[in-house]
Amino acid sequence: MAYQDSIEWLFNQVPMFQNVGAKAYKPGLCATLALAAEYGNPHKSFPTIHIAGTNGKGSTAHTIAAVLQAAGYKVGLYTSPHLVDFRERIRVNGVMADRDFVEKFIEDFRASMPRKNEPSFFELTTVMAFRYFADCGVDVAVIETGLGGRLDSTNIISPALAVITNISLDHTALLGKTEEEIAVEKAGIIKPMTPVVIGNAAGGVRKVFEDKAAQMRAPILFACDKKLFTPWKSKDRIIYAGTPWGEIEGELTGDCQVENAATVMTALGVLCERFSAIDEAAVARGFAEVCELTGLMGRWMTVKDALVRTVCDTGHNIGGWHWLGPKLREISVSEGTLRMVVGFVNDKDVAAIMAEMPRNAVYYFATPSVNRGRTAESTLEAARVAGLDGRAFSSVREAYAAAVDDSGSDDTVFVGGSTFIVADFLSSRS
């Protein structure tokens, strides 16, 4: 079976949240445990770091992986979703999983499928990643949850450290309608006697984490309680002065990255005890070269070789837009015309997100190319209710082309609103 045929089968035959939403969500660990056993329980053969949270978990996972990699460890990294190539989800030292491995794994699964529980896309992909990491002999793997935590497929691991970045309202139909309810689900990755780092939490959400940690007798640290550095921005970097590892230059420059950096540094303070090769040089390189080391894309990413200044970001919920909104509003009043190529999927609170968007930008609404993508026409209607206006396009490619055609030399084009809008945009350039 050719690789592309394997991937198309995986996308079309196995229930995939990206395409069908909640129908693909299978809460519970039984199917993952059974499937992992079929493949020799590979997750038990290497130490792991488990990362959950509503926003920032991707940046946090990649940065921790980059530091460990810079320290000389062989590092597995499992994240989701992918933007261009499925294999982005499964990397070792920044290199995507081997095509032949993916093809053979899917071929083997299909041959033995009648005797296995029918897994979801994420359950199957999770076990695939664990098997790949074990076969590659990784020293450690950084594992990002897919959705939630307590019942997430990745929660079959017993990590050396759990990290929960923050909590805001997202996937409320599946995880809970309040931040406290969502926190309960995320807190499910806290394991007995295992350290846990919380990025940012207050009030009832903080109490959820404190109570769970006490129940599990797990040491708990809150990054938001610490003063680990003084940040300031240069043209294309964030400088973190006074860290335990000296002055650090951060490659990721989105406004949310200061909070993420505090979470990462708090986590590294714990990890240093087990991974002793983490030193000043490793931390400095991991922060400064995270994209090159790990392949990270889509986090306030300036697109190279674009005809006009183009930035894309995968922030896709109200928590993410609390960070994106102010930055975009600042650009809209100071740097020519801001042109917004945006779109959404059907399960997002579009009205709340649009309240964070600049009033004086020019909008180009696009339909994401996934089954649960919200049509551009529907998004335009919602925008008009929110006091915005623009034009609707059937694809991101068409919307972006129109934005570029309309742009002057001082303008900025932003691409985002959904991870899948960014994926469509980057795919159109590959």
Image (spheres, helix red, strand yellow):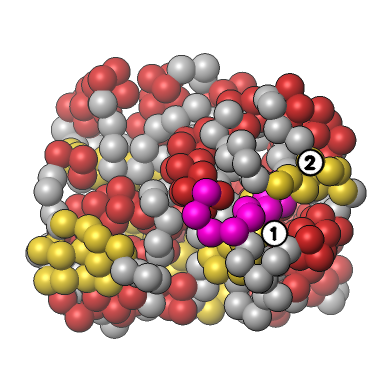
Q: Element type at marker 2?
A: strand
Discs 1/2, front: 2
Task: State which quadrant residue 283 falls in.
Answer: bottom left
Would you call the spot at circle 2 few (<14 residues within 10 Å), some (14-19), or many (20 or more)? some
Q: Is residue 121 above or below residue 187?
A: below
User: Does 11 sit left or right of 268 as displayed?
Assistant: right
Name the amino acid, label 2: Gly
At 85% from the left edge and 43% from the top edge, which residue is drawn?
392
Give the CA distance from mark 1 to mark 2. Answer: 22 Å
Q: Which residue is mark 2?
A: 390
Residue 29 position (above or below residue 62): above
Q: Position of residue 46 (x, y in %)?
A: 36, 65
In the rendered structure, which segment of residues is drawn in magenta? Answer: 333-342
Q: Position of residue 58 (x, y in %)?
A: 46, 54
Label 1, on which residue? 423
Identity of the residue drawn at 13% across and 45% down: 226
117 sits to left or right of 95: right
Residue 252 on the magenta span: no
Marks 1 and 2, the one that precedes in the sequence = 2
Name the residue rendered at 74%, 76% in the picture: 430
| Helix, strand or loop status at disc 1 | helix
Image coordinates of residue 117 in percent, x first then y, are 70, 42
